Image (cartoon, rainbow, N blue to C red):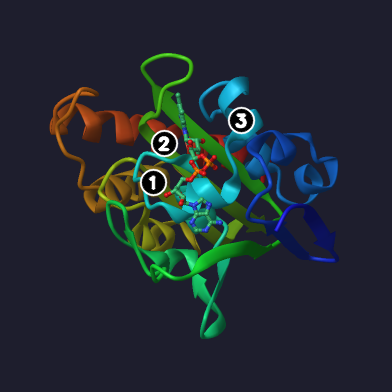
Amino acid sequence: MKGISVDGGNVTIGAMTTQHELISSDALAAAAPIVREASLQIADPQVRYIGTIGGNVANGDPANDMPGLMQTLDATYHLAGPSGTRTVAAREFYEAAYFTAREDDEILTGITFAATSGGYAYEKQKRKIGDYATAAAGVLLTVEGGSCTSASVALTNLSDTPVYCEDAVGVLVGSSLDDAAVAAAVKAAVDASDPVADTRGPVDFKKYVAGVIVKKAIESARSRA
Ligand SMILES: Cc1cc2nc3c(=O)[nH]c(=O)nc-3n(C[C@H](O)[C@H](O)[C@H](O)COP(=O)(O)OP(=O)(O)OC[C@H]3O[C@@H](n4cnc5c(N)ncnc54)[C@H](O)[C@@H]3O)c2cc1C
């Protein structure tokens, strides 16, 4: 349940792999650089030396960064229990805060996803170093001949589950990623968010921050595509 393997275009990460190990793996950074970019924004080195990818994605904490990242990557979760093994798509796994598709007698053993190509970005707004996100977004973009051929956009801590932004993806794919398309995608992503007021701010503030973060993430991914 520990370790990272990159086999051709397929990435496999054992559930007990720490966030520090994700950051340290050059093979993973080459196959999916968004993972290092996102992991470096989790808490601080002390947390990242101990925190595991399995513990981060399995407990359904909406503030954790890895669930949104895994939705961006369209990752697959591998579960094992008394009845055997099964897989669940990260985009289907989260039901509500701390409620997931994992049964009580199952553990998450690992995660697989396809290596990425093109532009990527994980942007996060937090109150201070070591804090969870006020708003964060993961974006992947591929561009061919001036047109966006594939996209992925997901949000962290802007609802009681991570949010995969299907409508924002629909706006981006087929566009030239011009400013109008980016603005429409940002609006679609903010519309898909459903934050609650808490110590990180009221709902209107969080939606405003979500717009800023999603725009930054799309523009950063565009510049790398
Ligand atoms: C001060 C602080 C700041 C933090 N800031 C951030 C942040 O900014 N971003 C972020 O993403 N995270 C943050 N975290 C969370 C951290 O990254 C870890 O994800 C979290 O603490 C869980 O740690 P762990 O992997 O040791 O899991 P554990 O604490 O061991 O487990 C957490 C829960 O998941 C269950 N679990 C663990 N592994 C599995 C598995 N393989 N299968 C099924 N269930 C499992 C456990 O039973 C438990 O209920 C922060 C944590 C702390 C303490």
Q: Is residue 124 above or below residue 63?
A: above
Give the label on residue 48, or none: 3
Going from N to C along the chain, the mark reached first, 2 or 1, is 2
Is residue 221 or residue 104 the one in the foreground?
104
Q: Which residue is mark 1?
A: 155
Q: Position of residue 111 (x, y in %)?
A: 62, 62
Q: Amino acid at mark 3?
A: Arg
Give the label on residue 136, or none: 2
Q: Amino acid at mark 2?
A: Ala
Mark 1 lies on a secondary structure that is strand
CB atoms at circles 2 and 1 under 8 Å apart? yes
CB atoms at circles 3 and 1 under 8 Å apart? no
Instruction: Assess disc 2: are there few (<14), some (14-19) or many (≥20) residues with their C-alpha within 10 Å of its C-alpha.
Output: many
Q: Is residue 142 above or below residue 8?
A: above
Q: Amino acid at mark 1?
A: Leu
Residue at 49%, 73% (x, y): give it: 88
Q: Position of residue 177 (x, y in %)?
A: 50, 49
Mark 2 lies on a secondary structure that is strand
Inter-mark Cα distance, 2 to 1? 6 Å
Residue at 57%, 39% (x, y): give it: 121
Residue at 50%, 64% (x, y): give it: 174
